[in-house]
Image: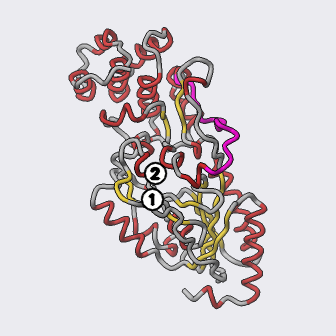
Amino acid sequence: MGDPQTADAGSAALRDRLVTVGRSAGLVAVGITDATPFEDTRQVLEERKAAGLAADMQFTYRNPARSTDPQQALRSVQSLVVGAWPYPAGLPADQATLGSGRPQGEVARYATSDHYADLRGALGAMAQVLIDAGHVARVLADDNALVDRAAAHRAGIGWFGKNANILVPGHGSWVVLGAVLTDARLPVGSEPVPDGCGPCRRCMDGCPTGAIIAPGVVDARRCLAWLVQAPGIIPREVRVALGGRIYGCDDCQEVCPPNRRLDDSALVTAGRLVDLIGLLGAGDDELLERHGRWYVAERNPAYLRRNALVALGNVADGNDPQVVAALVGHLAHPEAVVRAHAVWAARRLGRDDLVALVDGDESTDVVDEVRSPPPPAR
């Protein structure tokens, strides 16, 4: 593959140009590394997958041999140009003080708008510089084809936090990551950033379900961010911990000291709150149109409804006529996964009287939900 460190002065000038363009396009960090396979990362992925820690998560776990070898994405690759795009780091506000008085669901900050589109645009600007210089370039972001955190670490973008996120000096983990693969042999940038966590374990202790089982090791079977994306029934033991979340979870980032030092002047990031009654009242096509860029299991809007019903059970008033109407409508939903979670939400809100609406339901999921111990009352 060649050694990028032997690149000539022309390549050094190209590297400098890439960094300048990337920064001008909005990236808060740009780093360059070689394209040798991430063998240690491959081993870790395979071990965690074998141990069940990946649950049914695909992404880079789907094919570790592919996602840890840049040559699988670009045969002629010599270098990776890695970039970090920032997203708003406003701290959370009390849900009860927000919105129109109707129950609100919460969305993780990275999903409040299409930050990956912004990232791809900035990476594309650097890719165009390479193409104009006669090189091949391919942009990869939020893709199964590359372990972006490992690439960012090796490129000197940031260090691995105990929550397995990359923390960029001065920006924390409020970033999305991607890379440009190229056949240009570019000078390798700085060494990996030293660990900045030290003995701190606030993210581990702050995880609502104890999903961070060791420094840098996350058990997806307990991780709320994964469970709202996974298909099927949300485990009963984590539903109360979900609170108002309908997509993603920021708790391990919110308690992180480097993250908390950032500007918190905008306490609520635009798009973080979703009207649960409005979501549950929307048609399926409308739901996918609104939220289709999220990862929705099987592209089935029933899973958005499932998430919203759990959130409704955790934050709503069971005597609110609009809440009752939403529960009644979803207790009659054609998909069993929705009816089952509507049962849970009704019981959580003290509306056991509504559960009679599923009498005679033969779905195993619904029957199991009705027969299960009641959730703690709000």
Q: Dot 1, how many residues are within 10 Å of its Cα: few (below 14), some (14-19), or many (20+)?
A: many
- Which contiguous range is marked in magenta? 261-276
Is residue 286 visible from the viewing direction of this image? Answer: no
Q: Position of residue 268 (x, y in %)?
A: 64, 35
The residue sitting at 42% across, 45% down in the picture is 207
Tell me the amino acid under the disc marked 2.
Answer: Cys
Q: Position of residue 277 (x, y in %)?
A: 53, 20
Between the C-alphas of marks 2 and 1, the distance is: 7 Å
Q: Position of residue 182 (x, y in %)?
A: 63, 75
- Disc marking residue 182: none
- The residue beneath circle 1 is 162
The residue sitting at 61% across, 55% down in the picture is 175
- Report whether 33 appears left or right of 328: right
Is residue 178 visible from the viewing direction of this image? Answer: yes
Choose top left, top right, bottom left or bottom right for residue 344: top left
- The residue beneath circle 2 is 203
Front-most of 36 and 199? 199
The residue sitting at 32% across, 23% down in the picture is 376
